[in-house]
């Protein structure tokens, strides 16, 4: 008769026949040797996690099932949400109480994972961030801060905003005041060419605003010399004689082109001449 094949622990060589054993990488070990060689050490109690225990792990750290609990309140974290802080495991409630922000309205903790609103270093529960006027949650909609309150755009416009005298809509940012009336910047236009006047030099006639170019083309006197408009709005100086006007640089002798500004001159029909040219025959 042949001897039966031996089935021993790979490490201590004790027979495993009829005994509990554990396979690792196609090699058998008795439970004692396996735990001594391979068992993880529990972070909670510092004892090995035996083969008859559940091994719970998180980021290469291991716990017995009964040791896996909140570091502050000692409640079990098995199959529950938890958070880590400075190598400590905390239940969501303890973590929120110690580290989460507080709602600026109700002063209660804003729990991790819940929707919250943040503005200038303050936090709110989504349901606590309300319009100061209508008391409805603002949520992700636009809002406008005013004094110590926050307003949804429709409420702010109703309570505070000026109405543009051109389009009759609320002015929420910026704006222009002309003749004590409010305008949107984009609505304050030249009555002639419809160009925006905000930030530009302009003038008015009969209470209507004009850009300098339109005003000059429509109302300014024309230079006899160059036929272009004469306007003092841009700082131009001009000469006036017998209901005719010249730019200072255009007031020259018709014959020799010398400047007549500050000089005597003569007229010959519609022409102006220096005294030398005027005396020539």
Image (cartoon, rainbow, N blue to C red):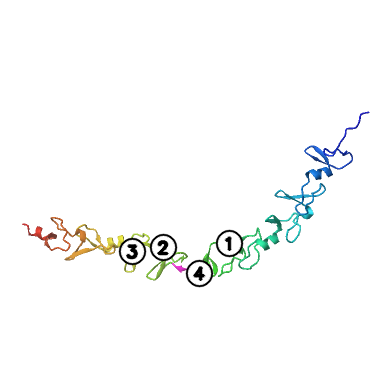
Q: Which residue is mark 3?
A: 202
Q: Mark 1 or mark 2: which comes first in sequence?
A: 1
Looking at the rendering, the stretch of residues picked out in magenta corresponds to: 155-163
Task: Give the distance between the C-alpha atoms of the residues marked 4 and 3, in whole angstroms.
Answer: 32 Å
Nearer the observer: mark 4 or 1; the answer is 1
Nearer the observer: mark 3 or 1; the answer is 1
Q: Is residue 28 left or right of residue 123?
A: right
- Quadrant of the image containing the N terminus: top right
Q: Mark 2 or mark 3: which comes first in sequence?
A: 2
- Quadrant of the image containing the C terminus: bottom left
Q: Residue at x 70, y 61 (%)?
A: 94
Mark on residue 158?
4
Task: Give the distance between the C-alpha atoms of the residues marked 3 and 1, in whole angstroms.
Answer: 44 Å
Q: Mark 3 or mark 1: which comes first in sequence?
A: 1
The image quarter containing residue 99 is bottom right
The image quarter containing residue 267 is bottom left
Please, is residue 247 above or below residue 31 in the view?
below
Task: Give the distance between the C-alpha atoms of the residues marked 2 and 3, in whole angstroms.
Answer: 14 Å
Q: Is residue 87 left or right of residue 55?
A: left
- Mark 2 and mark 3 in contact? Answer it, CB < 8 Å: no
Mark on residue 118?
1
- Mark 1 and mark 2 in contact? Answer it, CB < 8 Å: no
Q: Is residue 77 left or right of residue 189?
A: right
Q: Which residue is mark 2?
A: 185
Q: Residue at x 34, y 66 (%)?
A: 208
Q: Mark 4 or mark 3: which comes first in sequence?
A: 4
Q: Mark 4 or mark 2: which comes first in sequence?
A: 4
């Amino acid at each position: 008769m042949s001897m039966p094949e031996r089935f021993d622990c790979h490490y201590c060589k004790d027979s495993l026949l009829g005994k509990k054993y554990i396979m690792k990488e196609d090699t058998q070990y008795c439970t004692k040797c396996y735990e001594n060689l391979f068992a993880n050490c529990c972070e909670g109690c510092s004892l090995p996690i035996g083969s008859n225990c559940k091994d719970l792990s998180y980021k290469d750290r291991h716990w017995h099932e009964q040791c896996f609990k909140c570091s502050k309140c000692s409640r079990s974290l098995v199959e529950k949400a938890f958070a880590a802080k400075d190598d400590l495991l905390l239940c969501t409630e303890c973590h929120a109480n110690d580290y989460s922000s507080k709602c600026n309205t109700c002063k209660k903790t804003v729990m991790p994972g819940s929707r919250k609103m943040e503005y200038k270093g303050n936090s709110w529960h989504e349901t606590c961030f309300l319009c100061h006027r209508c008391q409805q949650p603002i949520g992700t909609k636009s809002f406008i801060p005013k004094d110590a309150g926050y307003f949804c755009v429709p409420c702010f416009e109703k309570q505070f905003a000026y109405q543009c005298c051109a389009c009759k809509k609320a002015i929420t940012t910026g704006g222009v005041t002309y003749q004590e009336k409010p305008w949107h910047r984009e609505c304050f236009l030249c009555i002639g060419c419809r160009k925006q006047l905000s930030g530009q030099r302009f003038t008015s006639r009969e209470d209507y605003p004009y850009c300098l170019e339109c005003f000059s083309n429509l109302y300014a006197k024309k230079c006899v010399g160059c036929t272009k408009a004469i306007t003092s709005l841009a700082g131009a100086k001009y000469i006036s004689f017998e209901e005719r006007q010249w730019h200072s640089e255009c007031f020259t002798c018709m014959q020799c082109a010398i400047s007549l500004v500050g000089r005597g001159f003569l007229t010959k029909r519609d022409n102006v001449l220096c005294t030398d040219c005027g005396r020539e025959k």
